[in-house]
Each structure stands twice: as C-alpha cells, then as structure tokens.
C-alpha cells in the first residue's frame, strides 16, 4: 500500500499556500541540499570557452543546422533556451518557446560528452560554450556519448518563492523538455529524459527519422513568438471566445495524448496517474460545467458555469476571466509526492511537460494557454470536487484567444 504521508517539500509548499507566513517570503533563503544539487556551479563562467555564434545563426536565419550530432544538439538547445521576443516596458517582458514564472528563465544546461571526457556549460546568454568540471556527473548507461543535465540559478527567484523554487524549476524543466524533445526529433535527435539522485538528465542518441532542415527552426521560432498571452502591459485581456463541439473534441484528444506521453516519459506517472479537469463556459455544441477527462470521454461533475468561480479563487486581480472559454486543471494523487524528493521533482516535470504539449496544441488552434499556480487551494479543490477521488489541484492552464492576434481597426 502507498503511504498517505506527503513528502516534506509538498507539505511545506501547501502549508505556505494556506498560511502565507510573513517570515517565509521576505528574505531569500539559503539553498537547501536539493537546490544545491541543481544549482549551476558558481565557477561556471570562469573559462572563456567557444563562441556559439555558428550554432546560433541557424536559429536566427532559419537555416539547416550543421550535420554532426553534437552540432545539431547545440542548435536545438539554443533555439529552446533563447528568448524569442520582448515586451517593452514590462517587468516580465522576456518570452521564449516555453513559459517561465515572472520571466525569470533560470534554466541552464550542462553538456557531458563521455567520448571526449568533457563537460561544458551552455551559456546561452553570452553565447559561449564554457568548459566546467563535471562535479560528479556520471555518463548515462548504454551507448549514449552525450547527455544534458538541467540546472538552475535559484538566486534569481524573489523571496516570495522561497518555498516554491524547486517546484517552479521542475515545472519549467518539464515545459523545456517538451520543447526540446519536439524540436530535437525534427533534427534527428533521440532525446530521453531521466530523473534520479544525480538530477535531471537527457541522454542524446541519433534518430533516423528527422529532417534536419531549416523548416523546423522557422516553425519553432514562429511558435515561440506567438504562444505567449502577455502582449499588453496591464494584465491579461483575451478576446471573446467559446469552444465549439469540434474544438472541444480536439482538446480532449490532445489532453489524453499529453497524459499518455507523460506516463511514457516519467515512470512515476505510471504509478500515480495524473488527472485532468476542464472548467468550461457554454458554446455551440458545448454545455457549461466541470468535466473530468476519462478514458471513455468527458464526465460532467457539475453543470453550472464554473469560470467566474475560478476567477474568484484566482490570486491576481489584473486578469479578467470574462471572455475566457475555459480552464484546465491538472490534479495529482498527493501520495505521489511522498517518499524521496526526486518524486516531487519528477511529478512537477511531468506536469510541466503536459502543459507545454497543450500550449502547443492551443497555439495550433490560434489560441493561447497560460499556466498558473496562483489560486486558493482549498477553494479550487472544493470547486473541482477533488475529495471524491482523493486528488489535489496542482497546475492550472488558462485558455483563450489572444487579443493581439485579432484584426484591429484603423484609428482615425
């Protein structure tokens, strides 16, 4: 039987959400053992390294990457890590192909080359590949000569996130992994994530089915520019939209596929499956209500329109849900977070991966998906009737149509 005692990381995080203690959000905390394991080493920038401009150029020009496995990996990494656009005069103005809370983008990558016996830090901001000690990182088992290790700079987080830093890092790592796996496949890269006591690694193999052309980079750049919902400086103002029956069917399929993919990539999800619940306004062929995504289809839990209630439980006052067609909530079995801290990291990575796959689906429907964790935990759990299945709301995705993509009239 599974124990019902939650791990310390989850217990601390949920306690913070309920109690919001003053002393936990005023001064930055010293990194704990888990954060130190994932923290980018302080010596990472000491060596000059190699200029990455030749690998970055295809990202800018949409040209084919160089043909070597390592070369294609470097171009793919730079495409996924580099900002795609900037919203001027906004405190959260950087936008990449995956979202990052408050646009911190703390993710960093170490590239371990077992065949060359080398380890490098990919400094994507200065475009340098800097040699660095491996710090005990071991090459992956099998024949993978290259592996990526995901790190972070936890010092960029505001003290408000002292108890959330690990979750935010792991969620973002999941978003990032979804992106690099998708783009890497087009560039003949077989990328396989794994999480263990050493950290988060992605082994790199050659993949025979890719195209290795410039079209994939061009499409990725377009997605990275279009996917974000924050095109305006004063909160979120989506255009009016409703799902119709066909669009809802496509969304349901995308959710099921993303959950299946996560179960294939993250073993813990096979043991503790994620669940998804939709809060929908009425549309053509769509009845308002709260729905659970089940293998046999949508199961309605409540027929009332829940979107306004979602807004009341949302913690930020500068978002209007008036024109929002629906929200998705990913829920977890709390026992998944018990045991070793890597369980906490793995479940958050899986949630980020699912959300990113759905953001990509929504972008293909000319919509946006905006992930969030800022809500009243008790209120949202009650609204979604989580006590019935013993789950807990953990990650939300607000869906809508971006007003900046609508045709604007000429001002006279």
Image (tube, helix red, strand yellow):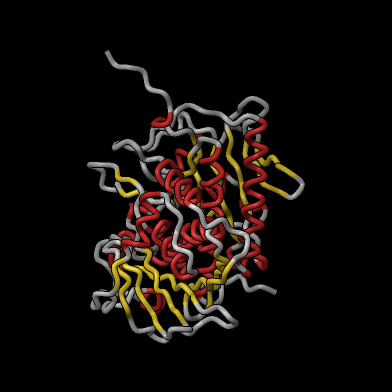
158 vs 74, nearest the viewer: 74
18 vs 409, nearest the viewer: 409
118 vs 82, nearest the viewer: 118
- Residue drawn at the location 45% of the way across and 79% of the way down: 113
- The percent position of residue 328, horizontal first and vertical second, equals 56, 45
337 vs 202, nearest the viewer: 202
Extreme residue in the top direction:
412
- Residue drawn at the location 31% of the way across and 67% of the way down: 123
Q: How many numbered marks are there? A: 0
For the N terminus, the quadrant is bottom right
- The percent position of residue 16, horizontal first and vertical second, equals 40, 61
Q: From the viewer's perspective, is residue 355 above or below residue 342?
A: above
Q: Is residue 178 visible?
A: no
Q: Is residue 392 left or right of residue 406?
A: right
- Residue drawn at the location 60% of the way across and 42% of the way down: 278
- The percent position of residue 309, horizontal first and vertical second, equals 50, 37
Q: Is residue 295 visible?
A: yes
Q: From the viewer's perspective, is residue 39 above or below residue 331?
A: below
- Residue drawn at the location 57% of the way across and 52% of the way down: 330
- The percent position of residue 92, horizontal first and vertical second, equals 30, 48
Extreme residue in the right direction:
296
For the C terminus, the quadrant is top left
Residue 58 sits in quarter: bottom left
């Amino acid at each position: 039987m599974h124990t019902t005692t939650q791990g310390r990381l989850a217990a601390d995080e949920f306690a913070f959400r309920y109690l919001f203690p003053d002393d936990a959000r005023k001064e930055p905390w010293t990194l704990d053992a888990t954060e130190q394991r994932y923290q980018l080493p302080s010596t990472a920038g000491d060596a000059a390294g190699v200029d990455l401009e030749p690998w970055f150029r295809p990202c800018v020009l949409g040209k084919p990457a160089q043909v070597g496995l390592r070369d294609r990996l470097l171009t793919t990494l730079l495409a996924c890590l580099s900002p795609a656009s900037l919203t001027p005069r906004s405190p959260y103005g950087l936008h990449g192909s995956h979202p990052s809370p408050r646009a911190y983008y703390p993710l960093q990558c170490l590239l371990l080359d077992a065949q060359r016996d080398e380890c490098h830090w990919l400094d994507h901001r200065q475009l340098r590949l800097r040699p660095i000690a491996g710090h005990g990182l071991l090459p992956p088992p099998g024949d993978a000569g290259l592996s990526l290790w995901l790190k972070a700079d936890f010092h960029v987080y505001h003290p408000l996130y002292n108890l959330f830093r690990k979750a935010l890092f792991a969620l973002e790592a999941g978003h990032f992994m979804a992106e690099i796996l998708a783009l890497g496949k087009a560039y003949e890269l077989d990328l396989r994530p794994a999480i263990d006591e050493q950290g988060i690694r992605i082994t790199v193999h050659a993949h025979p089915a890719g195209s290795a052309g410039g079209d994939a980079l061009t499409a990725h750049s377009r997605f990275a520019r279009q996917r974000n919902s924050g095109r305006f400086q004063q909160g979120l103002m989506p255009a009016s939209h409703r799902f119709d029956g066909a669009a809802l069917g496509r969304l349901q399929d995308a959710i099921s596929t993303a959950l299946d993919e996560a179960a294939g990539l993250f073993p813990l999800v096979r043991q503790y499956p994620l669940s998804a619940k939709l809060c929908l306004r009425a549309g053509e062929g769509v009845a308002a209500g709260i729905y659970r995504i089940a293998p046999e289809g949508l199961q309605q839990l409540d027929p009332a329109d829940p979107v306004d209630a979602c807004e009341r439980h949302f913690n930020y006052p500068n978002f209007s849900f008036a024109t929002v067609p629906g929200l998705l909530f990913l829920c977890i079995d709390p026992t998944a977070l018990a045991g070793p801290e890597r369980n906490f990291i793995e479940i958050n990575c899986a949630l980020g991966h699912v959300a990113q796959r759905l953001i990509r689906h929504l972008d293909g429907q000319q919509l946006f998906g905006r992930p969030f964790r800022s809500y009243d935990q008790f209120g949202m759990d009650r609204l979604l009737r989580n006590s019935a299945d013993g789950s807990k709301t953990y990650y939300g995705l607000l869906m809508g149509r971006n007003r900046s993509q609508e045709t604007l009239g000429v001002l006279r």
